[in-house]
Amino acid sequence: MKEKLIFLILIFIFLSGVISGCIENNNQDTEKSPSDNQTVNESELNPLTQNETEMLDKMLWVPEIIFDSNTSDSVINATVDKYFGENIPKKIRDEPLYVNSYLKSDKDLFEGYKVDLQDDSLVEIGNPASPWVYTIVESEKVIDGDIILATHISGENISEELNRIRDYGIPIKRTKSVTISTPSAADNSDSKMTAAVDECNRDNTVLFVLKLYLKC
């Protein structure tokens, strides 16, 4: 009888420790979970490590400037000459490879349109998932009171996809671009090129400025 009583006491002590540990762990998990009002540090969402970011900073790149599709070639050439120097080698594309479209909306309706585009499997918005091909200096901007958002539409027929999206009432438009020639490639330590890109990005004629990374 005495041995049975001791056995029951030992079981009770063991179970008390387990329950106490579970409660403590639950409390710790609760403390680690952010509340709805907490701000998530953006750096925690960045998939790049510090070494990868430093590597990206050292990669050679050339600027690609994105315009509305109705922009004339003469305006495009004049813009490039203004910020990057006259007669610099360049190539104009009527169908850009990366940012081939953009959303333009007033502020009240912008977020709703953005959510609709995020739900579309053929639309990529903002910077790409893989930053090793290109990055956008500023993918969401305000120009003349409207918000513009860089997008890329995939599919066999871009025009059909654009019309499909417009049929839903989303004001999405086509783009054209100009790419600076590879002999003018720079890296992020090139302060002159970086300053030119920043100034160009602030021009209201320009929608977006990309850095196209070169595979060296």
Image: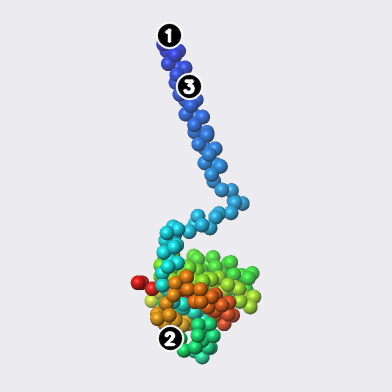
The image position of residue 137, as x and y in percent, is 51, 71
Say whether disc 1 or disc 2 marks the residue closer to the N-terminus: 1
The image position of residue 26, as x and y in percent, is 52, 37
Task: Provide the secondary structure element on which disc 3 rests.
Answer: helix
Task: Read off the residue under disc 2.
Answer: 89
Task: Provide the secondary structure element on which disc 2 rests.
Answer: loop
Under mark 3, the amino acid is Ile
Q: CA distance from mark 1 to mark 3?
A: 19 Å
Residue 121 in view (yes/no):
no
Q: CA distance from mark 3 to mark 2?
A: 81 Å
Would you call the spot at circle 2 few (<14 residues within 10 Å), some (14-19), or many (20 or more)?
few
Task: Read off the residue under disc 3.
Answer: 13
* Callouts 1 and 2 close, C-beta under 8 Å: no
Under mark 1, the amino acid is Met
Q: Residue at x 50, y 29 (%)?
A: 19
Say whether disc 1 or disc 3 marks the residue closer to the N-terminus: 1
Residue 51 in view (yes/no):
yes
Q: Which mark is residue 1?
A: 1
Task: Provide the secondary structure element on which disc 1 rests.
Answer: loop
User: Quarter-wise, where is residue 49 in the image?
Assistant: bottom left
Q: Nearer the viewer, mark 1 or mark 2?
A: 2
Q: Of 48 and 195, which appears nearest the observer? A: 195
Quarter occupied by the N terminus:
top left
Under mark 2, the amino acid is Pro
